[in-house]
Image (cartoon, helix red, strand yellow):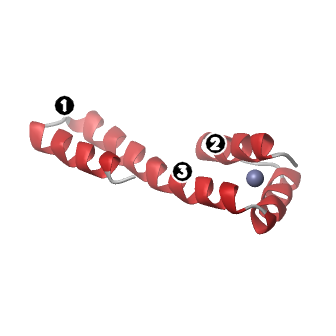
Amino acid sequence: MSCRKASYIIEKREVSKLSLWEKLSLKFHLMICDLCRRYESDSKILGKILKSLHKHESHAHLSSTDKEEMKRKLASF
Ligand SMILES: [Zn+2]
């Protein structure tokens, strides 16, 4: 599997379920590819931030404190 395909599956996993084949081939690719492992852990962090953003939005608009906090988190990547 190419890195391009691997990163596609990593992103797809954030929004939908993967087939067994996709899971296995991604797992195998991550065993041999440092770059995509790195990408995967970054995308997990990003996913968490996006989820917490979404949670905030369902209640109210982000306060300026939240925005500053978000900026700091994003800057630390
Ligand atoms: Zn790769």
Disc 1 residue type?
Answer: His
Residue behind mark 2: 11
User: Is there CB contact under 8 Å for labels 2 and 1?
Assistant: no
Residue behind mark 1: 61
3 or 2: tag closer to the N-terminus: 2
Disc 2 residue type?
Answer: Glu
User: Is there CB contact under 8 Å for labels 3 and 2?
Assistant: yes
1 or 3: tag closer to the N-terminus: 3
2 or 1: tag closer to the N-terminus: 2
Residue behind mark 3: 43
**Which quadrant of the figure has residue 40?**
bottom right
Of labels 2 and 1, the one closer to you: 2
**Which quadrant of the figure has residue 26?**
bottom right
Q: CA distance from mark 3 to mark 2?
A: 8 Å
Residue 22 or residue 8, whichever sits in front:
8
Which of the numbered marks, if any, corresponds to residue 75? none
Which residue does the image show at 70% across and 44% down from the upper left?
A: 7
**Which quadrant of the figure has residue 25?**
bottom right
